[in-house]
Amino acid sequence: MDAGPHPNRALARRGVRLQRLDPHSEYAPIVKWIFAQRLAGHSTSRIARALNDAGIPCPSAADPQRNPHRTHRQWTLTTVRAILSNPRYTGRQVWNRQRTDHVLLDPDNTTLGDRDVMRWNPRDEWVISRQLAHPALVNETEFVRAQSIRATVQTPGHTYRLAGLLTCGICERRMESCWAHQHPAYRCRHGHSSTTPPDTTRPRNAYVREDRVWAALPALHLRTTGAPTAPPAEAAATYLREHQIGLLFDPAARTITAQTPGKERIHLA
């Protein structure tokens, strides 16, 4: 929305005006409902399924001009997660959440050029306004609670210590927690979920047991940070969360790669 002339006189003389965010009469209540459902303990899959069942248009369908690369079909788990992790809904403006990295298409043949890849910056590099910049849709206390619900997934008798950290190397989707053969594990169904119909052409599900990744965290921490000694796995996992470093799992090579500029890689036992 228009917020009046720019405070810089030179820019104001050129007709530049400030812009601010205002709650959308139709879509702001949906965002509030998503946070309320998450705070009630519902999974992102259940929230996405409920939105699709109710016929509520997903963001790309509601505003296709801003999302020409999207299919505009339905809500996905990634869309719900993106809303739940966006601090702008607390009323504060945020800058530098993402950066654009230029990645070579083929490191062995630089003539092929590169491609732009959007990556998340660590939270300590974000720039957050001290003053409220627009009306809040969720208060800061509830927003922080919503993040903690995603950080550790617990079901009766089951705890997943790496929930939210692993990404599938085949389709680059976040891997979901599951219980396999009496052990916590993570899997990727490559887009298939309770919100989508089955697809017979998709790759086989990718699985990795948590203890395999957990045992490799100290060595990966050494390679990523250059620390003189390896910390316990718990401390290594905490470091990954605090710096928002994800892990890319390659089911064929059985490796995990830190999603850092150096892309440090460790083979799983």
Image (cartoon, grey):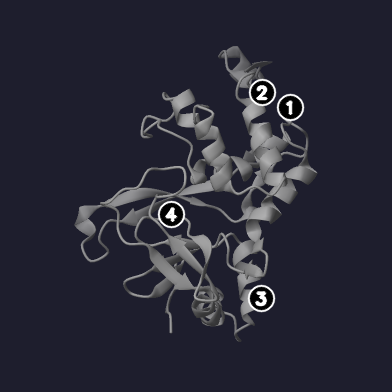
Callout 1 touching callout 2 (CB < 8 Å): yes
Question: Residue at label 3?
Answer: 235
Q: Name the quarter where the N terminus is drawn.
A: top right
Callout 3 touching callout 1 (CB < 8 Å): no
Mark 4 to mark 2: distance in Å?
A: 30 Å
At which x and y percent is residue 250?
37, 68
At which x and y percent is residue 206?
38, 65
Q: Secondary structure at mark 2?
A: loop
- Specify the amino acid type for callout 3: Ala
| Residue lying at 62% horizontally and 29% vertically, measured from the top left | 30
Q: Secondary structure at mark 1?
A: loop
Q: In the depicted view, which residue is nearer to us: 250 or 3?
A: 250
Vertical relation: 159 (above or below) 18: below
Residue 81 appears in the picture as rendered: no
- Specify the amino acid type for callout 4: Arg
- Specify the amino acid type for callout 2: Pro
Question: Residue at label 1?
Answer: 135
Mark 2 to mark 3: distance in Å?
A: 40 Å
Q: In the depicted view, which residue is nearer to us: 117 or 204?
A: 204
Mark 3 to mark 1: distance in Å?
A: 37 Å
At which x and y percent is residue 90?
72, 37
Query: Which tag, 4 or 1, sits closer to the chain's start?
Result: 1
Q: Secondary structure at mark 4?
A: loop
Question: Residue at label 4?
Answer: 173
| Residue lying at 64% horizontally and 40% vertically, measured from the top left | 94
Q: Single out the mark in the foreground, 4 or 2.
A: 4
Vertical relation: 19 (above or below) 188: above
